């Protein structure tokens, strides 16, 4: 029989993502309805080191389900990666009588959670909060769907100018070391090509395709580049140099991380937030919560830290087919 938790902590860490607030809301309200208090930690692990803790009640999370960013703020803490930082973080958890912790974040945040769980036996559950969709054990991470949509909105606008001026356009999207966002965006935007870290590429064959298209009267191209594969300015310069065709680039950058979360992200965040609290209550620690084929899926944190192999073959085949 596990000991009933009285007070749990929640933090967001690493790059923010649309839907994190919906997750916080679900955590706070589930805990509240189960008779537990919630401590919100400001600025992720750095806030644990700096002892930045606030109480969160039912009303504190009103009207945030539709807001981008995170009301708890977030950070990437270098100090937490040290022995001293880890110990300071645990001391803050103890000082505030926090019995269990819910971490909402990406791979770096998961590794931090794993340390607290393994080294300090602290009860922890994690939720996948990152636009990158690069965590094992879940089909989707909170924020990815919105980030893809946001990128598509921008590219739809870029398409107007591309067509009017008959150019090649290279669009760089985020994703860290993963090409997932790039593939989604490429398909959704009807792009001609995509460069992702999971697949090697060479300029000669890309230029060959562009020139062949050009000969057939194709006058505009959209090429999506995952930030982990190459830098858009370099790709654009190279294409222009080798093809002789006017090429421009845009780096969408952090615009993809902001904005109102789409329905899929709000719903995912809400389901996972509830589940995370229930896992803590059930004494299931050191776990990462996700969704596979629309069912809640729970994996050990150690596994969850690994980057999954997503099936990219089908996406690439479709791009090739529809170009
Ligand atoms: O992990 C989310 C992410 O947006 C990545 O896609 C990107 O590589 C990184 O964070 C950017 O981090 P920062 O906001 O610290 O520049």
Image (tube, rainbow, N blue to C red):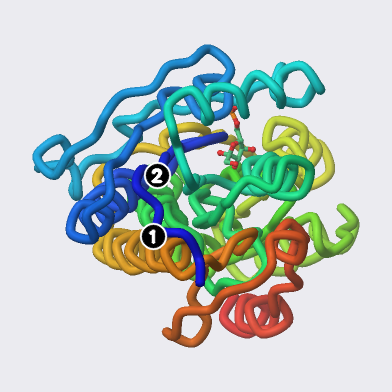
Q: Would you say the beta carbon of the disc 2 residue lies within 8 angstroms of ligand 1?
A: no
Task: Residue 134: give x, y in percent of width and height.
Answer: 65, 59
Q: Is 213 situated above or below 56?
A: below
Q: Is residue 208 visible?
A: yes
Q: Residue 251 falls in which quadrant of the image?
A: top right
Task: Residue 180: give x, y in percent of width and height.
Answer: 62, 62
Foreground residue, 263 or 277? 277
Q: Can you identify the residue that label 1 sits on? A: 277
Foreground residue, 25 or 283? 283
Q: Residue 298 falls in which quadrant of the image?
A: bottom right
Q: Residue 322 falls in which quadrant of the image?
A: bottom right
Q: Report if the CB atoms under discs 1 and 2 are less than 8 Å apart.
A: yes
- Where on the image, by quarter, is ligand 1? top right
Disc assigned to residue 146: none
Q: Is 97 situated above or below 125?
A: above
Categorize mark 2 by other alpha carbons within 10 Å: few (<14), some (14-19), many (20+): many
Q: Is 308 situated above or below 36?
A: below
Instruction: Locate residue 315 relative to residue 208 in the image: left or right.
Output: left
Instruction: Locate residue 41 relative to residue 201 in the image: left or right.
Output: left
Q: Give the quadrant of the C terminus.
A: bottom right
Q: Is 282 situated above or below 53?
A: below
């Amino acid at each position: 029989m596990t000991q009933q938790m009285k007070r749990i902590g929640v933090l967001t860490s690493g790059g923010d993502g649309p839907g994190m607030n919906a997750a916080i809301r679900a955590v706070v309200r589930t805990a509240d309805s189960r008779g537990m208090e919630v401590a919100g930690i400001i600025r992720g692990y750095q806030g644990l080191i700096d002892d930045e803790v606030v109480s969160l009640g039912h009303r504190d999370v009103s009207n945030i389900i539709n807001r981008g960013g995170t009301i708890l703020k977030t950070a990437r803490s270098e100090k937490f990666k040290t022995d001293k930082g880890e110990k300071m973080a645990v001391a803050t958890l103890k000082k505030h009588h926090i019995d269990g912790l819910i971490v909402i974040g990406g791979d770096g945040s998961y590794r931090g959670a794993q340390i607290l769980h393994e080294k300090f036996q602290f009860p922890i559950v994690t939720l996948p909060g990152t636009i990158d969709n690069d965590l094992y054990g879940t089909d989707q991470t909170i924020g990815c769907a919105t980030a893809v949509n946001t990128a598509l909105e921008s590219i739809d606008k870029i398409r107007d100018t591309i067509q009017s001026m008959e150019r090649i356009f290279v669009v760089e999207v985020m994703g860290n070391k993963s090409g997932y966002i790039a593939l989604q965006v490429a398909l959704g935007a009807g792009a001609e090509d995509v460069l992702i870290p999971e697949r090697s590429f060479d300029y000669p064959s890309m230029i060959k395709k562009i020139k062949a298209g050009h000969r057939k009267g194709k006058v505009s191209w959209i090429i999506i580049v995952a930030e982990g594969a190459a830098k858009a300015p370099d790709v654009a310069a190279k294409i222009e140099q080798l093809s002789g065709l006017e090429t421009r680039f845009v780096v969408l950058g952090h615009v993809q991380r902001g904005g109102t979360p789409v329905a899929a992200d709000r719903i995912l965040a809400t389901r996972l937030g509830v589940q995370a609290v229930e896992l803590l209550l059930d004494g299931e620690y050191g776990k990462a919560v996700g969704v596979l084929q629309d069912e809640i899926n729970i994996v050990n944190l150690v596994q969850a830290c690994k980057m999954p192999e997503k099936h990219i073959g089908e996406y690439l085949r479709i791009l090739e087919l529809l170009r």
